[in-house]
Each structure stands twice: as structure tokens, then as C-alpha cells.
Amino acid sequence: MEEEKKPLNFIEQIIEEDLAKDYSRENLRFRFPPEPNGYLHIGHAKAICINFGLGEKYGAPVNLRFDDTNPAKEEQEFVDSIREDVKWLGFQWDEERFASDYFETLYNWAIQMIKDGKAYVDDQPSEVINEQRKTPFEPGIESPCRQRSVEENLELFEKMKNGEFPEGSHVLRAKVDMASPNMNMRDPVMYRVLHKEHHRTGDKWKIYPMYDWAHGESDYVEGISHSLCSLEFENHRPLYEWYLEQVEIPEHPFKPKQREFARGNVSYMITSKRKLKLLVDEGVVTGWDDPRMPTISGLRRRGYTPESIREFWDKAGVAKRDNLIDISLLEFSIRDHLNKIAPRVFAVINPVKLVIENYPEGKVENLTVENNPEDESAGMREVPFTRELYIERDDFMEEAPKKFFRLSIGNEVRLKGAYIVKATRVEKDDNGNITTIFAEYDPESKSGSGSEASMRKVKGTLHWVSATENIPIEVRLYDRLFTVESPDEAGDGDFLQFVNPDSMKVVQGFAEPSLKNAQPEDKFQFQRIGYFAMDRDSTDEKWVFNRTVGLRDTWAKEQKK
């Protein structure tokens, strides 16, 4: 049966229309252009998937370009992390470029614009320049510097370049239209004076190009056919196109087309770099890769897979208008993938001791269990079973109601992959807390033995861990970082009031010995609990695991209580 073709999204429709007119596939080239001023987040992953996905679809090259035009905020650390994130997501770029590669070219084009009467140096304070721009409902006021001669502008611009002026004292502005209803067209700033060392060019430059000037021209230099960006740049498109009209590169027959798509806004997440930085600086999280952060490095550390993130954005689709995507779709994507690939293991994170009094003391019985019932090739493993075990404290009630199908005095349950047991009595401490549960087992009820007793049905099945053959584990139970769907809508500091105080709980437990050889980022399903990934904080004495996601979506249920 022929597979049904997926309908084209609106960006693919644009490209198909261009191919039907005057483009050929050889003309197609895309790019992902992050600014290296922070770590990439889930929203950036959408842009990565769109641009590299188009490259894969059309067999077109995709550049990774760092828009490094602001040395005050950019660092090599961020460049390195961005490279790693793109690779981890499963993509490979054709060429790595930097906007700083073109500083000389951009400067020379700016000189030509001055000579053509299309740019001028303005030495007014920035507050005055902003005031002269007025509002979209009234024309702006032209700067008195607008009528400077070409010679004077060239001389001043040269002094700016040589660092003869203090920061903030002079800017180069494009001479566009101070009456335009689009505020971006009201003589935008092209260059500002910055006495900051650049992570690549050192102290060579004392002027740096503004994003709008550098971005489109960089696209043109690289032969980018379609410059795809988020919707916030829609009203920048006229300026993008105006700047492109000022230069010509004969070897590139087509000028880039800017087209916008909806941002990747996910509920209960922040995607503002400024606010993410505040979370780090205020110590709300432990760093950019804290597993509660929506950064790609944070999601990776939490246990998300590249496949799940790519599948999430594929399901979310490419929209023309901003919308809020339900985080449950992201959680579904990772559950679905981990269900297929994650080995099942036994771990107890709220332990209480269970002693099987009629089981031989000192005996260690290695029981064979499946690694993953969803994957036949995953094979089997052995888990040690002993007289003393740990079970989850929540799996026992001394006196249980009728619908409690776990362990209670006088009732039977099956220990998964092992035997049927019946609780007989308990021991408690001085505060009345249960310290030990005593039980008896049916020796004929061993799972998979084929005996009549092994076929006997009981209403509950519990996971367990040997009390003597195990490894100690620290479990970090992560939850959503915010308690409201749209924390991004709050002000810079106001959003902190919506931080979930229960976004991380740390508990101590035990796991089966097979996890002793686990490596950071290895993923597992703790049976009946959820999906977990080993954290890099693990040591030879204690293994640390991060909860990626529960087995079911319990958040909605909790919110209704």
C-alpha cells in the first residue's frame, strides 16, 4: 500500500512555487543563524529542524552561521555549545560561517552607501534619536546630521572605526524614510561604537554592525536562497530587503527571501534568553543545562532524545501565527520513543523492607527477565532475588480498602518476574512508622516455571529490589519548572513568582545491580515509576538518575484536584 503523502507546510509551498518559476534545486541553500550569546533552547530546535529538514528534503546545503555582531554578550563557550547541540539533534551543516567573517565586506559596503548618500553619521544622544523617531502614527523628525556632506561622513566614520570616539557617542545610520509607518525604516542604525574585544577578531574593530545590517547581507554573501526566521522579524522584512537593494553580488543570481514562521512557544516553559539567564543568575536553577531548563543541553541531561525532539516539532507543524503548544505533546513524544528503546529495570525510590520468612537465608536466586518487551532484540538479563527485599512504601497498606490491589496483611501479590507472596505482619518504630513487612511466599509460584501455581492469578504485581544485592541511587524527580502555562507573558522579574517550588525533589533508593555499568545519559524505564536517565554527577559510591518523564501524564490530573 502506497504511503500517504504528507501535505506541504506553507514554507515548502513557497519553495515549490519558486522552483516552478525561476529557481532550480541548485539555487537552494538554507542556514541556521544563532547569536552565540546563550544556550539553544526548545524554540531554537524548531528553527534547526525546519532549516536542516528543508536541506534534507531538497538535497540542499545548510550553513551554520554565528551572527556574532555583539561582543558584549557573546562568548566562545556559547559557540561550542551550539555546535554540540546541532550535532546532537542529528544534523550536519555544509559550511560553518560567522558574521564576523564579513566585517571588512560590510564596512566597505557601508563606505559605498555613504558615498551614494544613503548613510550618515549621527552624533546625537540615543535618547534624542529615539525621540525623533516619534510613533507609527506620526512622521519622525529628521536628524540635523542627515544633511552632512559625504566627505564629513566619511571622515567621521573613519574616526569611529579607529576608536577615536567613546562608546555611544556616534552611530552610522541608513538614510531611508523618517515618515515610514514601519519604525524599522526610520533611518535605522547600521553601526555603533563598541570598545569591546571580540571572541574571534580581538580588538581589531571598534565599530560593530547592527543585526539588521549584518544579517541580510551575510545571507546574500553566502548565497542563501530562503532566510527563514521567527515571526518577530516580520516587520523587519522591508528593511532586510532595502539593505539587499544597496549591494550587488554578480555570482549570486538571486537575493535571499526572508520568510517568517511562528515561534516555538511551549506551555510551562520560558524561551526568552534574557529570562533564562535570570533563572541561572538568581540560582533558581543550577546552570544552563539544569534538567528543568528548556535548553537543548538541559533536555539532553534530563533524558530527552534527539528523535523525540524532532518528532515533537514534526507533529507540532509549521504555523504562520504564534500559538502555544501544549507541553504534553513534547512529553508524549519522549514517552513514545523511550517506550521503544529504554531497557526495563527494577528500582525502588521510597523503600520499605520486605522479609520473606520462609525463603532460605543466604540464598541468591538469579531470575531471568526481559530487558524490553517492545524490542525482541533487547534480550534478557538476570536479577538477583533474596530473602530480604525492598518494595515501594506506597505499595503496602496494613489495612487496605477493597480497591487497593497491592500488598496488605493477609492479601497476595506477585513480585514481578518472581513469586507470589502474602504479607503476614509488620514491625514499626517508636513513632508508629512501618520499618519491616514480613511475608511468606509460594515456592511453586515462580514466574515462567509452568507450574499450576505460577498460573494462579492475583490482582497486583509489584516491582522489587534485593536488599543485599543492589546499588544505592539518588533520584532527582524533576517536574515542570513553572506552575502557569505562559510564564513568558510575565515581566522580566514577575515570572519568577510562578516558579514551581516542587520542580525538583531528591530521594534516595536502590536499584538492581545491572545499573552499576550505566553511563551518563543512558536511559531506562524504572518499572511502574517512569523513565530516567543517568546523570553525570554519578560516582562509584552513588548512582544519580534524573526523571525524564512519568509513565503517564499526571499533571493534568493533579491540576484538577
Image (spheres, rainbow, N blue to C red):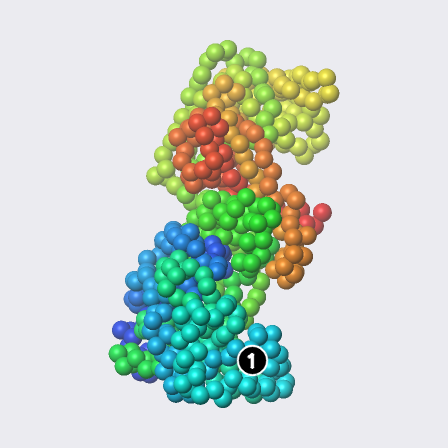
Residue closer to the observer: 179 or 227: 179
Residue at x-position 40% and y-position 81%: 154
Where on the picture, by quarter, is residue 199?
Answer: bottom left
Above or below, 92 against 167 in this view is above
Residue at x-position 47% and y-position 66%: 194
Where on the picture, by quarter, is residue 78?
Answer: bottom left
Estimate the x, y position of residue 457 in percent, counting from the top left.
55, 29
The quarter of the picture where the N terminus appears is bottom left
Estimate the x, y position of residue 389 in percent, counting from the top left.
54, 21
Residue at x-position 42% and y-position 45%: 340
Estimate the x, y position of residue 544 in percent, counting from the top left.
49, 34
> Taking the image as drawn, is residue 557 in sight?
no
Q: Which residue is mark 1?
A: 183
> Taking the image as drawn, is residue 330 in sight?
yes
Estimate the x, y position of residue 59 in percent, counting from the top left.
29, 66
Viewed as shown, does residue 148 lie left or right of 437?
A: left
Which amino acid, mark 1? Met
Above or below, 555 against 422 in this view is below
Viewed as shown, does residue 504 lie left or right of 2?
A: right
Residue at x-position 49% and y-position 75%: 171
Above or below, 30 against 334 in this view is below
Residue closer to the observer: 376 or 68: 68
Residue closer to the observer: 446 or 465: 465
Residue closer to the observer: 163 or 542: 163
User: Dot 1, how many residues are within 10 Å of its Cα: few (below 14), some (14-19), or many (20+)?
Assistant: many
**Among all residues in the image, which is located at the extreme top?**
361
**Among all residues in the image, which is located at the extreme front?**
164
Task: Identify the secondary structure beneath mark 1.
Answer: helix
